[in-house]
Image (cartoon, rainbow, N blue to C red):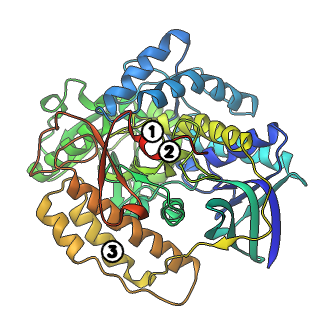
Amino acid sequence: MRIVETELLVIGGGVAGAYAALTARSYGADVTLACKTPLTGGSTRWAQGGIAAPLAQGDEEAHALDTLKAGRGLCEPEAVQAFVRDARSHVETLRDLGVTFSPHVTLEGGHSRARIRHTGDSTGHSISLALAGALGAARGPALDVLEGAFVRNLRVSGGAVVGADLLTPDGPVQVRAGAVLLATGGFGRLYPVTTAPPEGTGDGLGLAWQAGAALRDLEFVQFHPTAVVRGGAAFLVTEAARGEGGRLLNARGERFMERYDPALELAPRDVVARAIAAEIAATGRVDLDLRHLGAAFVRSRFPTVTASLAPLGLDLGADLIPVQPAVHYTMGGVQTDVQGRTGVPGLYAAGEVASSGLHGANRLASNSLSEGLVFGARAARAALAVLKPVPARTEALPAPLVDPACLHALRALVAGAAGLRRDGAGLRAALDAWAWPVTGAESRESLEAGHLALIGKRVLRAALDREESRGGHHRTDFPGEAAGAVHSLQSRALGEQVTRVPVGAAAAAVLGSSA
């Protein structure tokens, strides 16, 4: 086994991990970045719409209010304020790294004004290429990038996380580090119909759970309203299509959103997703109509979507596009404070794997890429501020192994009980049936299945415990929003219990002053 020593181990090469690694290098730290795909893999490259940040000093308050409104009372105000303060400067750094944003900013659902910067409909891909290029240029003795490296388990010493064991194409690698930063993305692949890439299996949440970190608000899963689903695959049609004037029509040709929200097609995603699901149930289908915008404009504005739909026999500029909701983003994750600290010494998290407090019960459109920048940089700086020497002796945490052959049934069970609409009977039945075969054959697939089995149970428990409807969590047996907003917390120390913590108190309750 090859042994690597580094000051900071970053796990994940998307926007949060790549930017965190670059930030740490800018402070002179030795960094090892491990990602289980090539650097341009992961979720970041698939982000079509754009990146949200205040346009100018005066837009910070409006952007904060839009974020808080979308989050339905569960945003942490400190996280929102940190985000709107920092986001614009980090987006400007992307320009310095070579991302050429269009001078045309656009509007998306839940935003009170146009503030979404984009590079057509391939913004995430442009950002991913720029960050990968910067990392490539910085590679050397102080920056080691391990692509195709899957993290088997974390390593600890004296209660602190101090490294990880990796499965790489060149054999096993043990990394000993002063601190570990998780930037592994979400768990969209817990569901059968999702826009998440194949690697979105919640690895970071499983690793953090084994280390003793708390998982927060796992019941809040965001369904993107407009995906084209064929053969179980979901092809995203960016929210910017509605921002440019796209209309939603039911099977009777009616523009129906006025019955659900005065913001029409630009209502928050949870509202639009449930409206589309209701109209499909009532009339048989829902179409996205861009024809009135002109085929030439549509094809030039959305070349990536146009190209992705063409093999399906759909012309974005000339046809009605049949759409339906698909799992897109997971708001819940490893609980952190605004510095990316998890409460477990030496362990930090940023990006979709983390519950930073920014998104609350429903992520505001296009806040995710900029969240990765803001909190990736904050987590890197926080980790470097308290680095400890790399210990000579470390202990490997256990790695749960589940037979990957059960994943089809596991996903179907989660989707049936904890989909767009939930109820207590269905959630209890799913938990009663929750038993999956373990395996002694260790592989990336059995480790991923183990993470999904662990997280799936926690999603079901959190959804059952939350007897209200709020944001991305809708209970048909509790259709109203409760008077007080509380987070759900789960951890190994709590066993099977779900703890409720008021907004503003969660970080203090779990994190204390630990780093």
Which quadrant is the N terminus positioned in? bottom right
Name which residue lies at 37% across and 20% down: 65
Q: Horizontally, is 145 left or right of 223 in the view? A: right
Q: Secondary structure at mark 1?
A: helix
Q: Secondary structure at mark 3?
A: helix
Residue, far right: 141
Mark 1–mark 2 Cα distance, whole angstroms, equals 5 Å
Q: Are marks 1 and 2 in contact (CB under 8 Å)?
A: yes
Mark 3–mark 2 Cα distance, whole angstroms, equals 32 Å
Image position, residue 198 (x, y; %): 50, 65
Do we see residue 6 in this rendering?
yes
Q: Is residue 334 above or below residue 384?
A: below
Do we see residue 255 in this rendering?
no
Residue type (three-letter) at the residue carrying disc 3: Leu
Choose mark 3 or mark 2, whichever is in front: 2
Q: Say which residue label 2 marks.
A: 511
Q: Is residue 504 above or below residue 34?
A: above
| Disc ID at residue 508 | 1
Q: Based on the displayed image, in which of its 4 quarters is residue 350 positioned? A: top right
Q: Based on the displayed image, in which of its 4 quarters is residue 247 positioned? A: top left
Which quadrant is the C terminus positioned in? top right
